[in-house]
Image (cartoon, grey):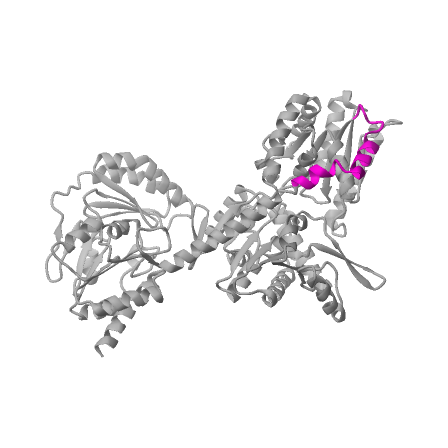
């Protein structure tokens, strides 16, 4: 079993010199983070090598990369333009960073994004074995988990997104939103940097797809997909030890000479509109205007790493930064002092390490950022526990580094005040804050991130497998069918809604269809079978639907019972005096929840919210439960949350008691109970150990087995009837 990492780029840069390709390790956060994993030998990394390799040279490149456990996906220049520059960076990047006005929804971008994701899948299939773990990285490959799942239904697939995930309102602007989500939920585990992203994803998926969620688990068809936050870390030891190397010490001395009394503020970013670079400069200008005492006393070292500056928004941003820095420096500089030292280029890590170690203040104020590792690199480099980190609340890192000075990046006054606070902060306070942040960055380092993710992925897969063993199809079906064939006194308790038929928006639409009548008749032809339909439905409804069949009926969760050929009996001593007060209260909720309604039964009231707006119904249901729980208990009522319903009923009324009541004095040698709801748990609990109890829906249950939906229920019941015919034949 190996781990297969798939990302847009391989962790090496390819350069061509004198017609020869050479490979140098990439400096990116992901490449360094996963270096240990993929170099351990039991791993392959799949990705684009970074340049357009002509076809005749591709085999040679493949061969060279294979020695490094790397496997290339070759992309043409057109594919890079449309899939990477186009869809990934002109649709997903701006939308996920909340800059929707920058997004260009071009159909040819989308077509190419799909075909390149398919290309990555083909490459993966070449190297994948059945038991391998697949770990897909980032927003360029959102469709890949779904494509791989279709080809390898039992694969173990994890996905991690390194940029933010937007709220539902923003995400739904993308024309291909369902396709993207369906791609993502091909994973078993989806990871984000923060819990906010997790929340956004779950609310988006449950609103746009036919999936439901319980806490951080999505249920889709037969699978459970876990969504969790895994804040990414850095290689703490590497940054901490770098500052002690000779090379970095030299750089530190070079920086510090002549600046002994100067306070240095550091800012390092890639050129991007999500990084808040201009706002940072404006805040510095504000500081110099309002606090002239700092003129000549502070210097901002601003490094902007070039990125995609052929794209109009980026080149425009670069021009604005150039212009702003030029104006600011021209206005405030003196012969031997300049407020902003601006560098539009990248630097070797030794220079960055020296800057991290010498800067008194590090200014990290992105408008929106998945994590932001610069803040963590700064902390790891502060071996003396001094220095102040000013951090935007919009960066994922702010959720962990709570001892930083947290600012709203849109509030220039806020940033200015934070800089003043940082410049004045006593050493003791700096050390107290820095120590606590260093502990966090050291503990939650990049290895911790990798191990956590892989461990959780294995757990998720194991729990899926344990669910599969309870899935009552095939092997389990055979066990049930074998016992069925050998027994002669059988009892089948069948719930109705959600078990024998699907749910419908309108409760009156769920009447039995011809196939269901046929199935029940086939079950009742055999005199060894006793079929009991046990439902929360009103007894009049059940009479209407099943009164002419050879079945026993239990209605309203046990308040009414009827044996075949007999008349209906209600439970003695039941009262419905409580109904008016509860109904009046429920009506106030119905008035505030369009689409909800109250159904009245003899000894219970049901509040239905299947047709209410997604989310609003759940909110009201929670309100009803918290407000009316105590009142219900006082009146001897049970409050039962079900599938898009809440039911109030007499405490004595309970499907479990009704089932036991029915079984009194009978000694069947085969009991099968099927149900999908909270109320059916009472039956599962009440029945003897040798009964076959089956929950419809794969949620946690007292039942021994589960089936996914009413179709699987019918299939199971038909298989029993047919097996019986075979036995008799």
Which residue does the image show at 32% across and 38% down from the upper left?
Answer: 588
Which residue does the image show at 20% across and 42% down from the upper left?
Answer: 650
Residue 563's spot in the image, x, y percent? 13, 59
Which residue does the image show at 13% across and 50% down from the upper left?
Answer: 570
Residue 397 sits in which quadrant? Answer: top right
- Between residues 421 and 278, which one lies in front from this camera angle? 421
Residue 609 against residue 245 in the figure, above or below:
below
| Chief SS of the magenta region | helix
Residue 282's spot in the image, x, y percent? 73, 32
Residue sitting farthest toward the right = 335
**Residue 29 placement, left or right of 134:** right
Tell me the quadrant of the picture where the C terminus can be found.
Answer: bottom left
**Residue 168 placement, left or right of 313:** left
Instruction: Let me know if residue 537 is in the magenta part.
Output: no
Residue 478 sits in which quadrant? Answer: bottom left
Residue 198 against residue 473 in the figure, above or below:
above
Instruction: Let me know if residue 258 is in the magenta part.
Output: yes
Residue 327 sits in which quadrant? Answer: top right
User: Bounds of the magenta span?
Assistant: 236-262
Residue 621's spot in the image, x, y percent? 35, 42
Residue 466's spot in the image, x, y percent? 40, 56
- Between residues 362 and 392, which one lies in front from this camera angle? 362
Residue 295 against residue 586 in the figure, above or below:
above
Q: Is residue 418 visible?
A: yes
Q: Is residue 514 visible?
A: no
């Amino acid at each position: 079993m190996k781990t297969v990492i798939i990302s847009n780029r391989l962790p090496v840069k390819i350069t061509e010199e004198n017609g020869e390709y050479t490979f140098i390790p990439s400096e990116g956060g992901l490449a360094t983070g996963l270096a240990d994993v993929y170099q351990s030998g039991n791993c392959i990394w799949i990705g684009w090598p970074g340049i357009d390799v002509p076809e005749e040279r591709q085999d040679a490149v493949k061969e060279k990369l294979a020695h490094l456990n790397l496997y290339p996906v070759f992309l043409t220049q057109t594919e890079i333009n449309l899939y990477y520059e186009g869809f990934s960076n002109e649709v997903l990047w701006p939308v996920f960073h909340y800059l929707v006005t920058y997004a260009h929804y071009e159909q040819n971008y989308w077509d190419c994004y799909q075909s390149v994701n398919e290309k990555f899948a083909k490459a993966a299939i070449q190297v994948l074995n059945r038991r391998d773990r697949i770990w897909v990285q980032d927003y360029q490959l959102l469709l890949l988990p779904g494509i791989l799942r279709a080809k390898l239904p039992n694969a173990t697939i994890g996905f991690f997104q390194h940029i933010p995930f937007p709220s539902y309102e923003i995400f739904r602007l993308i024309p291909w939103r369902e396709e993207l989500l369906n791609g993502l939920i091909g994973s078993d585990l989806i990871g984000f940097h923060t819990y906010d992203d997790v929340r956004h994803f779950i609310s988006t998926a449950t609103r746009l797809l036919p999936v439901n969620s319980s806490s951080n688990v999505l249920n889709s068809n037969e699978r459970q997909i876990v969504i969790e936050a895994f804040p990414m870390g850095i290689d703490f030891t590497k940054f901490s030890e770098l500052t002690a190397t000779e090379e970095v010490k030299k750089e530190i001395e070079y920086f510090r000479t002549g600046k002994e009394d100067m306070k240095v503020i550091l800012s390092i970013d890639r050129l991007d509109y999500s990084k808040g670079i201009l706002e940072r400069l404006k805040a510095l200008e504000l500081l110099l205007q309002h606090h002239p005492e700092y003129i000549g006393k502070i210097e901002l070292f601003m490094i902007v790493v070039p990125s995609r500056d052929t794209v109009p928004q980026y080149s425009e941003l670069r021009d604005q930064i150039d212009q702003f820095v030029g104006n600011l420096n021209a206005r405030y500089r003196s012969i031997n002092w300049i407020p902003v030292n601006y560098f539009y280029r990248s630097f070797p890590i030794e220079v960055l390490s020296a800057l991290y170690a010498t800067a008194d203040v590090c200014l990290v104020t992105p408008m929106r950022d998945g994590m932001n590792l610069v803040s963590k690199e700064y902390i790891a480099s502060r071996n003396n526990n001094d220095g102040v980190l000013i951090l935007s609340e919009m960066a994922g890192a702010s959720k962990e580094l709570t001892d930083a000075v947290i600012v709203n990046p849109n509030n220039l006054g806020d940033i200015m005040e934070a800089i003043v606070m940082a410049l004045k902060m006593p050493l003791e306070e700096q050390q107290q804050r820095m120590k606590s942040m260093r502990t966090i960055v050291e503990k939650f380092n990049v290895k911790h991130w990798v191990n956590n993710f892989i461990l959780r992925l294995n757990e998720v897969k194991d729990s899926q497998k344990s669910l599969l063993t309870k899935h009552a199809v095939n092997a389990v079906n055979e066990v049930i069918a074998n016992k069925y064939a050998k027994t002669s006194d059988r009892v089948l308790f069948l719930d109705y809604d959600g078990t024998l038929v699907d749910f419908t928006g309108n409760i009156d639409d769920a009447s039995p269809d011809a196939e269901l009548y046929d199935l029940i008749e086939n079950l009742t032809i055999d005199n060894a079978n006793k079929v009991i339909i046990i439902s929360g439905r009103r007894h009049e409804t059940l009479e209407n639907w099943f009164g002419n069949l050879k079945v026993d009926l239990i209605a309203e969760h046990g308040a009414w019972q009827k044996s075949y050929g007999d008349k209906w009996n209600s439970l003695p001593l039941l009262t419905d005096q409580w109904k008016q007060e509860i109904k009046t209260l429920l009506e106030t909720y119905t008035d505030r929840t369009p689409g909800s309604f109250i159904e009245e039964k003899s000894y219970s009231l049901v509040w239905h919210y299947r047709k209410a707006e997604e989310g609003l119904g759940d909110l009201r249901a929670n309100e009803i439960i918290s407000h009316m729980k105590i009142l219900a208990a006082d009146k001897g009522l049970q409050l039962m949350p079900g599938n898009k319903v809440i039911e109030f009923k007499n405490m004595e009324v309970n499907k479990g008691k009704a089932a036991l009541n029915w079984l009194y004095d009978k000694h069947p040698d085969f009991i099968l109970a099927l149900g999908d709801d909270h109320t059916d748990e009472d039956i599962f609990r009440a029945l003897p150990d040798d009964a076959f109890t089956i929950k419809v829906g794969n949620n946690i249950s007292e039942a021994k087995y589960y089936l996914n939906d009413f179709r699987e229920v019918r299939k199971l019941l038909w298989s029993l009837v047919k097996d019986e015919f075979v036995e008799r034949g």
